[in-house]
Amino acid sequence: MKIGFIGLGNMGAPMAANLAAAGHDVTGFDMADVTVSGVTMAGSGAEAASGRDVVITMLPNGDILRAVAAEILPAMDKGAALVDCSTVDVDSARTVAEQAETAGMLFVDAPVSGGVGGAEAGTLTFMAGGSEDAFAKAAPLFEIMGQKAVHCGEAGAGQAAKICNNMILGATMIVTCEAFALADKLGLDRSKMFDVVSTSSGQSWSMNTYCPAPGVGPTSPSDNGYTPGFAAELMLKDLRLSQQAAESADADTPLGQAAMALYEQFVEREDGNGKDFSAMLPRFADRSRS
Ligand code: NAD
């Protein structure tokens, strides 16, 4: 397939490289001066999108997606597919979907889970929204870049699934860290706490797979000085998107809101910026109740 790839940052670059390595003809564009193995660089987004069967975007946020879509949709062929893999707000995904469909293009919102490691290894999970035709066109590419793709529903459904998942993750990580800090103060050994909780009803991905306590459970960013992994500021971004969506859908999400406020405090007023999101554990361990 002829593929355009716009946004070749930490995630986009290895995803584009995997598509090129699988034999696809990939033309890329990024505002920054980057080179990616196997990818021909274009001078603009429109040039990267023109004459392509599928154009993939992997951009920082919804405003940038809207701006890039306004530039590239007029350059794309009718019947081509725009596949946005960025994590953006549901409203931006739906707006760009409408614009693409009006212009005679297919659209899929397909945010990912799995981080930079998953992008490099080609083991991402894609959660996709869009028509059956649009999903079918993108599916072979998801197979190269990832290990699983779930078609969640119409346009916007992929972003909805992503922010609901990450709202659960953020709140669960916080309470797992709180519980370790409480266990410390109660004199309970962290490895005993892990042995019990990881096989009891308190278990979760945060505890079992990504344990925030160094030296306990499988290797995780806590064993590497809380170098991300999944940075606290990216968790804050996703929690903000979840609350923006909750606001516009009139959904009551008190724990999601509290999780957003805590990550906001950690990233913007404490020392959480640049640390893994599981670094909430030393934060709680160093504090007292008031
Ligand atoms: P990044 O900042 O490394 O990459 C974004 C790239 O987009 C940059 O290279 C930037 O130069 C480029 N860009 C910005 N504006 C542009 C424009 N107008 N035209 C062309 N290029 C432009 O970010 P990332 O970590 O690769 O994340 C990309 C998306 O994936 C985000 O939406 C993020 O939330 C999501 N995501 C990231 C992770 C992760 O672990 N990093 C995990 C899951 C999802």
Image: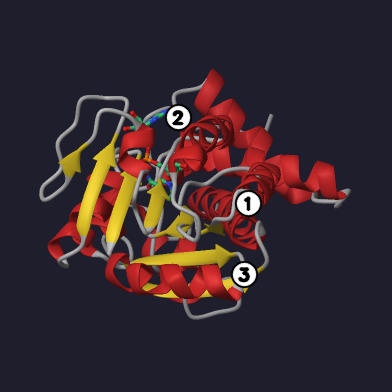
Q: Is 72 in front, or is 158? A: 72
Instruction: Give the residue at the far bottom of this rendering.
Output: 199
Q: In the image, what residue type sits under mark 2?
A: Gly
Image coords of residue 280 (percent x, y): 49, 41
Q: For the N terminus, give its image quadrant.
A: bottom left
Write the residue at 30% across / 68% down.
123
57 is higher (above) or lower (below) than 272: below
Q: Quadrant of ligand 1?
A: top left
Using a 10 Å C-alpha cutoff, classify the residue at mark 2 as few (fewer than 14 neighbours), some (14 to 19) or many (20 or more).
many
Q: Is 173 in front, or is 131? A: 131
Mark 2–mark 3 Cα distance, whole angstroms, equals: 40 Å
Q: Secondary structure at mark 3?
A: loop
Write the residue at 51% across / 71% down.
135
Asked if marks 3 and 1 touch (Cβ < 8 Å), the reply is no
**Mark 2 or mark 3, which is nearer to you?**
3
Residue 154 visible within the image: yes
Tell me the residue that label 1 is attached to: 97
Q: In the image, what residue type sits under mark 3?
A: Ser
Which quadrant would residue 224 be assigned to in this image? top left
Please tell me which of labels 1 and 2 falls first in the chain. 1
| Mark seen at residue 177 | none
- Residue 119 is left or right of residue 240, and the answer is left
Tell me the residue that label 3 is attached to: 131
Write the residue at 53% across / 29% down.
67
Image coords of residue 81 (percent x, y): 47, 58
Image coords of residue 183 (percent x, y): 52, 55
Which quadrant would residue 36 be assigned to in this image? top left
